[in-house]
Amino acid sequence: MIEVSKLTKCYGDKRAVDNVSFTVNQGEILGFLGPNGAGKSTTMNILTGYISSTSGEAKIDGFDILENPTEAKKRIGYLPEHPPLYLDMTVWSYLEFVYQLKKVQLPMKEHLEQICRKVKIENVQHRIIKNLSKGYRQRVGFAQALVGNPEVLILDEPTVGLDPKQIIDIRNLIKSLGEDHTVILSSHILPEIQAICDRVVIINNGVIVADDTADNLSKNMSDDFRYTARIEGPEGELISILRQIPDMVEVIPLGEKEPGVCEFILEAKPEADIRRPLFDAVSANQYRILGLKSNEMTLEDIFLQLTSGDTQNIHVSEILPDGQQKEQIQSGAAEIAGQFFDQDNSDEAETGTEDADGGEE
Ligand SMILES: Nc1ncnc2c1ncn2[C@@H]1O[C@H](COP(=O)(O)OP(=O)(O)OP(=O)(O)O)[C@@H](O)[C@H]1O
């Protein structure tokens, strides 16, 4: 549905977006992540036809945004970080205005009523926008993006400035919109991306450094053959039991963490699942496992690893036998990323806090 190919945007000498390629399939919700200044807004602005690229292409449903802007733009609903609302208008008259501006052909009353139902603003549709709470204003922003029923929705930081209840409501709204639309969601909020998105693209310094599902990113970047285990029993004896487990590569004792309970880092052969033999070996000796944690990375860890410093280097931390963390820089984040990222860079509801009486602040 969305194809971005070798997109580059230069502002003078500055390459804000550098040879970026990715696709978004129909019905997918794509999270677009990156630190400040990474190139997210520039990419979104090119996709929505607001600015032109220096080179490369962006196509929406096969229509090039530069060569065929009218057809491409018809298919896009855009919610910028600051929705362009006319605060002195009522919600309804504003939506009528957007409808006319977009030259929509659908029957107006039914269409706008359907949108108001979808984003749950029927109860405020005759109110002046400036009197609405931030959560309701954001819903009106969603409503304007939905006018014309575009296949693609581009949402730039849609939950910034909302309270926790409003955030949950807007996330649920995005998920429900994802059932009928292809969505690109730009956000700094990692749990949000993890909760809503099917796939994640991470951009840093204008370059894409990751493109995969959050789960795959986590699996591929984690040492998931490494565990931290808490076991009740004498440390010396436990070490020898643990070392005899087939596929165990290394057992690093971290000392007694509670009375009679020791902690260990366990490293198995890659691809080996040592959880069951571990349980059997420990219980056969009448000792008990009180905790077992895989050293899997969260999306936040991955994001920090891929975007800290320059994209050529990533931070790797290693836990030493004395329990201290050793930080090291591994070169070639792009290479590491390339192992599993599909890179082509070679070249509020009306209830609750959002009040029943129409969202007035
Ligand atoms: N009009 C412009 N002229 C010059 N440089 C610009 C312009 N717009 C953006 N840039 C630069 O391009 C880079 C990418 O900016 P962009 O706004 O796309 O990043 P972003 O990922 O959206 O960041 P943020 O999350 O802070 O909005 C930044 O270094 C920014 O300073």
Image (cartoon, rainbow, N blue to C red):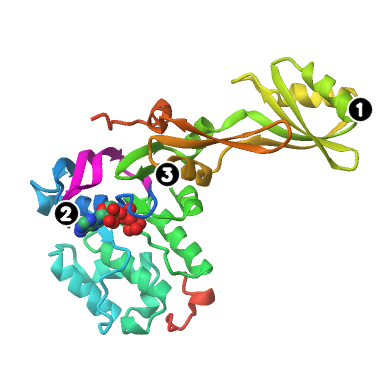
Q: Amino acid at mark 3?
A: Thr
Q: Secondary structure at mark 1?
A: loop
Q: Does 336 appear in magenta?
A: no
Q: Is residue 58 above or below residue 131?
A: above
Mark in front: 3 vs 2: 3
Q: Ligand 1: does it lie within 8 Å of the C-beta at label 2?
A: no
Direction left: furthest residue = 67
The answer to whether residue 60 shows anywhere in this view is no
Which residue bears the numbered disc 3?
307
The circle drawn on residue 286 is: 1
Mark in front: 3 vs 1: 3
**Quarter-of-image position of residue 158:** bottom left
Q: Position of residue 99 (x, y in %)?
A: 18, 68
Q: Position of residue 78 (x, y in %)?
A: 26, 59
Q: Amino acid at mark 2?
A: Gly
- Distance from disc 3 to disc 2, alpha carbons, whole Å, reads 27 Å
Q: Secondary structure at mark 3?
A: helix
Q: Is residue 337 above or below residue 125?
A: above
Q: Position of residue 278 (x, y in %)?
A: 77, 24
Q: Earlier in the sequence, mark 3 or mark 1?
A: 1
Measuring 37% from the left and 66% from the top, which residue is drawn there? 119
The circle drawn on residue 49 is: 2
The image shows a total of numbered marks equal to: 3
Instruction: Determine the main secondary structure of the stretch shown in magenta.
Output: strand
Label 3 packing within 10 angstroms: few (<14), some (14-19), many (20+) = many
Q: Position of residue 274 (x, y in %)?
A: 70, 23
